[in-house]
Image (cartoon, rainbow, N blue to C red):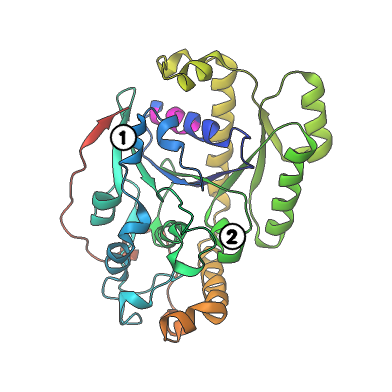
């Protein structure tokens, strides 16, 4: 499953995504976690120290390697230089898998141990002033989208992306890459306005969207969220002593997380697992093509000097089946880092 956590700054989105990642790891599920937020805090929320989090390799810095690897032997892509963030896979493309070892993970991911269970963590890297406002495939988030477009995942394995709820993801189509999107909203007018905006953007694309009410203090907050978002409200989360200790750098064993919060995390996993049954690989691939053509016409053709529509393989549909991917090189073993 591919799962996104989105929400406005300060909503607690990163904290909740980190708890969900810990929950999955505790259940011994294969997990790739991706920090695609403009503020890079997921590593710290997963227990990395400040220096360790800063030392995470930036996906954007490895974009040439990512493109060259994913291009594989695809005859429709003459050069990796012509690949942009929306480039879809085709016959001959290399595909990524959650639990495998490959050069992209070797260069861009670090394996953390969460209470002894491994989780791969990838990050776009911190945004600088020079990055803000930069368009097209130069964006660090573009590397995330390119990887998602070439990633084949199945049930009982998870890709969890912590990302903004901004309009950038809608311009590129990254918001369509997920089986389930959890929008973290506080019980405030501003919190639910983000939900309404996101739902409006996503309504024509069959996006599975559920709201996680955060910082809920009582029944009045719950009723407010129920009135504002209706059946899209999945669970609510209140104060957590475990989280407060974690934010102080003193996390207890995850099994000591409050029972109510463990139940909320299980509800998130159940919703994500249920969403997989609705996955339509043909629609998923068609949406890739749709946004690639839009971006090619808007800026990609001019930027690369190529007709990017020619990259589309009309006979290719991304699927879970093993035959979708060509033979991969020998695995490269990541070194786990305790967190």
Q: Residue at x 49, y 32 (%)?
A: 20
In this rendering, does residue 101 appear at all?
no
Of pointers 2 and 1, the one earlier in the residue sequence:
1
- Which residue appears farthest toward the right when viewing the image? 227
- Which residue appears farthest toward the left when viewing the image? 330
Give the camera-side residue of 92 and 145: 145
**Can residue 23 be found in the magenta stretch?**
yes
Q: Secondary structure at mark 2?
A: helix
Stretch of the chain drawn in magenta: 20-25
Q: Secondary structure at mark 1?
A: helix
**Which residue is tagged 1?**
52
Quarter where residue 192 is shown: top right
* Neighbourhood count class around disc 2 (C-alpha, 10 Å): few under 14, some 14–19, many 20 upward: few
* Neighbourhood count class around disc 1 (C-alpha, 10 Å): few under 14, some 14–19, many 20 upward: few
Q: Residue at x 38, y 27 (%)?
A: 47
- Above or below: residue 72 compared with residue 112: below
**Can residue 179 be found in the magenta stretch?**
no
Q: Residue at x 52, y 20 (%)?
A: 243
Q: Position of residue 152 (x, y in %)?
A: 39, 56
Numbered circle sitting on residue 168: 2
In this rendering, does residue 30 appear at all?
yes
Main SS of the magenta part reads helix
């Amino acid at each position: 499953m591919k799962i996104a956590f989105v929400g406005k700054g300060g909503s607690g989105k990163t904290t909740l995504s980190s708890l969900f990642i810990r929950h999955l790891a505790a259940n011994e599920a294969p997990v790739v976690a991706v920090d695609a937020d403009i503020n890079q805090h997921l590593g710290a929320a997963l227990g990395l120290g400040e220096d360790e989090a800063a030392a995470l390799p930036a996906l954007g810095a490895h974009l040439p390697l990512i493109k060259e690897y994913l291009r594989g032997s695809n005859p429709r892509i003459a050069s990796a230089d012509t690949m942009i963030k929306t480039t879809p896979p085709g016959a001959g493309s290399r595909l990524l898998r959650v639990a495998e070892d490959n050069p992209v993970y070797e260069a861009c991911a670090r394996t953390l141990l969460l209470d002894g269970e491994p989780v791969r963590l990838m990050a776009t890297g911190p945004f600088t002033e020079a990055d803000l406002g930069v368009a097209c495939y130069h964006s660090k988030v573009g590397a995330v989208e390119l990887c998602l477009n070439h990633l084949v995942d199945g049930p009982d394995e998870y890709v969890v992306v912590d990302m903004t709820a901004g309009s950038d993801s809608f311009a590129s189509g990254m918001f369509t890459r997920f089986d389930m999107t959890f929008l973290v909203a506080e019980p405030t007018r501003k919190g639910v306005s983000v939900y309404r905006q996101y739902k409006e953007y996503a309504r024509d694309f069959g996006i599975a969207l559920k709201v996680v009410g955060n910082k809920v203090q009582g029944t009045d907050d719950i009723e407010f969220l129920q009135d504002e978002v209706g059946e899209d409200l999945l669970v609510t989360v209140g104060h957590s002593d475990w989280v407060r200790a974690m934010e102080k750098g003193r996390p207890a064993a995850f099994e000591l997380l409050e029972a109510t919060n463990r139940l909320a995390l299980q509800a998130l996993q159940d919703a994500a697992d249920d969403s997989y049954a609705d996955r339509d690989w043909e629609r998923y691939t068609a949406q890739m093509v749709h946004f690639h053509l839009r971006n090619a016409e808007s800026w990609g053709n001019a930027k690369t000097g190529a007709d990017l529509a020619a990259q589309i393989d009309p006979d290719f549909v991304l699927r879970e089946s093993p035959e979708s991917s060509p033979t991969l090189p020998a695995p490269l073993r990541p070194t786990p880092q305790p967190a």
